[in-house]
Image: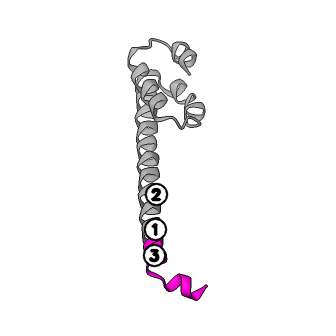
Amino acid sequence: MVVIRESSWYQEILREGMALGVAQGEVRGEERGRREELFSGIELALEIKFGNAGLELMPNISQISDLQRLKAIQQAIKTVNTIEELQQLL
């Protein structure tokens, strides 16, 4: 086992795997950051447009992980007239 760990190809595979892991971690971190940014924007928009009643939707919205769906919700807040209309989109 020691011989394998000391081989150059093993070391190269290890470096590539570590680099890939870091890259994947960065992507996940960026997605998590973008999701948090969208949650904050949605929360602010709900509060501005509908007051505390709008904020009552946040527990449901915070369960959504799909970035495209969150963006659509954020855009929909601009055009809906009532909380009920927004709830239908959720």
As drawn, 80 above or below 47: above
Query: What residue span does the magenta drawing correspond to?
Result: 1-14
**Relative image position of residue 47 (x, y in whole percent):** 45, 29
> Is 7 included in the stretch rendered in magenta?
yes
Q: Position of residue 23 (x, y in %)?
A: 41, 58
Q: Amino acid at mark 2?
A: Gly
Q: Write the residue at 53% across / 82% down.
A: 5
Q: Which residue is mark 3?
A: 9
Secondary structure state at the residue bearing disc 1 = helix
How far separated are the C-alphas under marks 2 and 1? 10 Å
Mark 1 or 3: in front is: 3
**Counting residues from the N terminus, which is met first, the one under dot 1 or under dot 3?**
3
- What's the distance in space between the residues labelled 2 and 3, CA to CA? 24 Å
Dot 2 corresponds to which residue? 25
Q: Quadrant of residue 36?
A: top left
Q: Nearer the viewer, mark 2 or mark 3?
A: 3
Above-or-below relation of 25 to 61: below
Relative to 35, residue 57 above or below: above
Q: Amino acid at mark 1?
A: Met
At 47% across and 70% down in the image, what residue appears? 13
